[in-house]
């Protein structure tokens, strides 16, 4: 099976941060699947990576989009949106059997939905963070527009996915409370 895997913050073992997506993709490759990872070339750790690379059998596509936790809120949101549309454009050049999108950010659902609809293939949405629930609750999301828009994007993600995956029982309960099933 050919799998399009969308993860804005994909890391290999030589990079700081979580390697969950790397490990999952590596195991998919070991089981005979082809995995095409679309991610960001966002900071100095990805400097040596440009365009396409092969990471333990994973075809990684590094899209240059700056991101840093030091960025202001608006710049981070713009970075999420820019990656979403660049990832959609790049992904449409590929032909895969399924699209797998892992959050955060929630905007990762945008290229996944676009790909799924245009290429007529199922979408799987993995929830790693309760977006927008947590950012709203802790006051990180203050814009009235974004507070109203984020739940719409959340619903679009769940409504357009064939399967939703929650990384914890707490996340699963929260998703079910919003009216969606986690399967």
Image (cartoon, grey):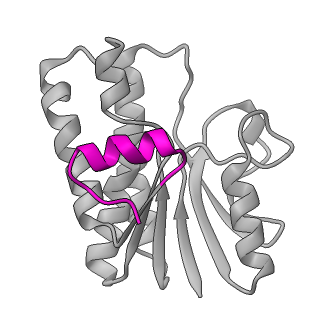
| Quarter of the figure with residue 119 | bottom left
Q: For this rendering, which residue is in front, 49 or 5?
A: 5
Determine whether, in the image, residue 71 is placed left or right of residue 53: left
Q: What span is colored magenta in the figure?
A: 166-183
Residue 96 seen in this snapshot? yes
User: Looking at the figure, which quarter contains the N terminus?
Assistant: bottom right
Percent x, y of residue 37: 61, 63
User: Looking at the figure, which quarter contains the C terminus?
Assistant: bottom left
> Which residue is at 22% across, 45% downward?
178
Residue 104 seen in this snapshot? no
Would you place residue 9 above or below residue 159 in this image?
A: above
Q: For this rendering, which residue is in front, 144 or 46?
A: 144
Marks counted in the figure total: 0
Is residue 87 magenta-colored?
A: no
Determine whether, in the image, residue 83 is placed left or right of residue 46: left
Q: For this rendering, which residue is in front, 106 or 85?
A: 106
> Which residue is at 70% across, 50% downward?
20
């Amino acid at each position: 099976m050919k799998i399009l895997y969308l993860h804005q913050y994909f890391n290999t073992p030589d990079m700081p941060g979580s390697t969950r997506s790397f490990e999952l993709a590596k195991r998919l490759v070991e089981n005979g699947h082809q995995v095409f990872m679309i991610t960001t070339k966002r900071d100095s750790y990805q400097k040596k990576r440009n365009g396409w690379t092969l990471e333990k059998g994973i075809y990684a596509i590094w899209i240059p989009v700056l991101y840093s936790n030091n960025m202001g809120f608006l710049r981070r949101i713009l970075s999420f949106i820019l990656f979403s549309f660049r990832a959609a454009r790049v992904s449409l050049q590929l032909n895969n059997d399924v699209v797998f999108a892992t959050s955060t950010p929630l905007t990762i659902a945008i290229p996944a939905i676009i790909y799924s609809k245009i290429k007529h293939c199922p979408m799987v949405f993995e929830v790693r963070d309760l977006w927008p629930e947590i950012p709203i609750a802790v006051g990180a999301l203050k814009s009235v527009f974004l507070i109203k828009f984020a739940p719409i994007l959340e619903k679009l993600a769940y409504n357009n996915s064939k399967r939703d995956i929650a990384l914890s029982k707490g996340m699963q309960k929260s998703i079910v409370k919003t009216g969606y099933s986690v399967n």
